[in-house]
Image: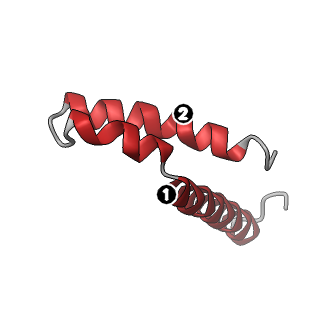
């Protein structure tokens, strides 16, 4: 999965930047640099991993609190 993470982040960045350009929040000239930036890609991979970990821990705590299966 770690080999696919940068690819997935690039795809998400492409769609997100397209939406931001469509809404007029991002200049079209900045999109290619945004998608190709390896530092931004690495930060987003770490951020997505952190969000997934936090959501998993939240779901576990909620299941324990409500007596659900853990």
Identify whether 8 is placed above or below 49.
above
Q: Which residue is mark 1?
A: 40
The disc at residue 23 is none
Where, quadrant-wise, is the N terminus in this rendering? top right
Depth order, front residue of 70/4: 4
- Picture coordinates of residue 13 (x, y %)? 46, 40
Identify whether 1 is placed above or below 65.
above
- Picture coordinates of residue 38 (x, y %)? 55, 54
Question: Which residue lies at the image location 63% right of the left edge and 67% below the top edge?
Answer: 54
- Picture coordinates of residue 28 (x, y %)? 23, 33
Could you classify mark 2 by the number of other residues whose Cα lies within 10 Å: few (under 14), some (14-19), or many (20 or more)? few
Question: Which residue lies at the image location 69% right of the left edge and 46% below the top edge?
Answer: 5
**C-alpha gap between disc 2 and disc 1:** 13 Å
The disc at residue 11 is 2
Secondary structure type for disc 2: helix
Depth order, front residue of 55/63: 55
């Amino acid at each position: 999965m770690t080999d696919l993470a940068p690819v997935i982040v690039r795809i998400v960045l492409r769609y997100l930047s397209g939406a931001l350009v469509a809404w007029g929040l991002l200049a079209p000239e900045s999109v290619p640099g945004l998608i190709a930036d390896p530092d931004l890609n690495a930060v987003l991979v770490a951020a997505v991993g952190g969000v997934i970990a936090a959501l998993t821990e939240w779901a576990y705590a909620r299941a324990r609190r409500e007596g659900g299966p853990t």
